[in-house]
Amino acid sequence: MSLAGQKHPRDDLDQSEETMIGLYDLYAGDLSEKMLSYASIDDLCKFDILSKKFQALAESRWKELVYEETGMKNGKADWVKHKSFLSEPISVELVDEADYGYGTTFAGTPRVTTNGSIVVMTTDDTSDNLEERTYPSSESEVICVRDGYSLNFSRLVSSPIRSWMLAICGRIGSEIIIASNCIQVAAIRGNDTQIISREGLPQPGNGFPLIGCETHLIICIDNCLILHRVETDTASEELLSFKQSVVAARKNGPQPQDVFDVPISISWGSDKSSFVYCHDTEISIWSLDVANDTLDKVKFIDVAGDDEDIQIDNVALGDDYIIGSSTDRDIHVWDRYTGEKLPNVLCDIEEEDDRLSPDDIIRELHLWCHGHILISSSHLGNKLCIWNVKSGVLLKEHSLELDELPDGNDLTDLAFLPHLNGFLLVTSHLTTFIAFPTNKRQESMAKSMKRREESIKRVLLLGVGEDFHAHSSASDSDY
């Protein structure tokens, strides 16, 4: 019997949640296939046009909603990334190269940076192994280089100075590794090196803060920014050429007796065309004019004008906000364009939290920002925090499981690896990769790294004389 002529009044329908028909169930079931089975070619053409219009509208709506929620601009892809940060990550503990006679990456205050293609980390002095290598002198410190896609150990680079801070300049495949301490800056590419010395007092903290990109290097010296350009002329004897020195802070700089008490921080924006610089209680945003080799100040914020007790020790630049961690254990947020301070103050601990260090150590927080989403380290030293800086809400905490490790095993630096959607974390005893996969490929890569590192550890524990590079080469096929 045909049902086409029968009518079913709405009053006869059960509108309870148990019997409501879900659109997703219709889409996922056989009904859509049955509907299309009656469609003509003309109908299918109309469906195709309608589908394209719907996809365009859906993509536009995705971008609107995701930006409103997270401040990210790439629609659905960024929503997947946002949700991945809230999921349980894959943790991979990288094997210490010292086990292979390469020196340790965990001495002093380890640093790490990446350009996406390679990862470089400061290492300890390998004077015990120098007789087997061709390094300039026994005073040299080596820099560990890993592949930015697989995190395989790649090589060691000899630095002519003790390296406390790191940056990467130059094109991919022809990178210049930059190292600094409190007196000198060294540029290294292959067998070529260039030393940039600075006369006068040592730099406060752990050396000259610096950032690099494909075309330029920016060095912070006291309250000045020094701009160098990457030399592409093969006939040039220099790797970097000086272009400009600008006074970055409005103050005249610290007095000699106070120089080591002044925190200085610098960080790129997402597109590496602008950066944020912090000197004590002054924050400024600068743009880099690549064509003219100049720096221009576009925004200035006097932090002391908001709160005289605030002293910023690290900064990050988001698309809409400036984020600064301070010595009062709070994270403060300013509007990037108006300079106004947001009322939200981010802090993952209470002032009298009994988990804090008994020595009242104030840890320097490490920050990474994408849209309104901020990933930060913690003053407890053993977790990553996921924040929405616009709302001030702590979205998620990920434990780093560092409680059982020796004292002082604090997170000293982090670097975001875009190809893997994860963070490389360095501490005084460990190097750990925390992966937040957004697709099956990234998940497979992270799990493959974990198997590789666990295999290497088993070899070390059993004392089997297998070669490290054999493990690295074998795992390359997974990528």
Image (cartoon, helix red, strand yellow):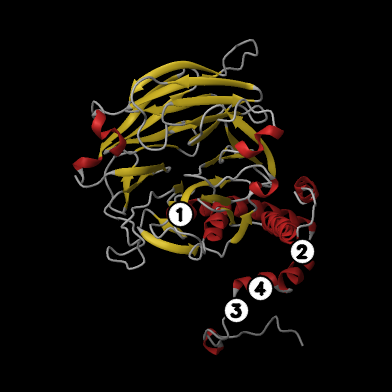
Q: Position of residue 268 (x, y in %)?
A: 46, 36
Instruction: Tell me which label, 1 or 3, sits earlier in the chain.
Output: 3
**Three-letter amino acid code at disc 4?**
Leu
For residue 114, which quarter of the picture? top right
**Three-letter amino acid code at disc 2?**
Ala
Instruction: Tell me which label, 4 or 1, sits earlier in the chain.
Output: 4
Location of mark 1 (residue)? 410
Instruction: Tell me which label, 1 or 2, sits earlier in the chain.
Output: 2
What label does residue 21 carry, if any?
A: 3
Instruction: Tell me which label, 2 or 4, sits earlier in the chain.
Output: 4
Q: Are marks 3 and 4 in contact (CB under 8 Å)?
A: yes
What label does residue 26 carry, if any?
A: 4
Give the Cα separation between the discs numbered 2 and 3. 23 Å
Tell which tag, 1 or 2, sits nearer the viewer.
Answer: 1
Q: Position of residue 436 (x, y in %)?
A: 58, 57
Q: Secondary structure at mark 2?
A: loop
Q: Secondary structure at mark 3?
A: loop
The crowd level at tag 4 (other Cα within 10 Å; few <14, some 14-19, many 20+) is few
Q: Residue at x 38, y 53 (%)?
A: 389
Quarter of the image with the N terminus in it: bottom right
Q: Residue at x 69, y 71 (%)?
A: 28
Give the Cα separation between the discs numbered 1 and 2. 64 Å
Residues 428 and 171: in front is: 428
Tell which tag, 2 or 4, sits nearer the viewer.
Answer: 4
Q: Secondary structure at mark 1?
A: loop
Location of mark 2 (residue)? 39
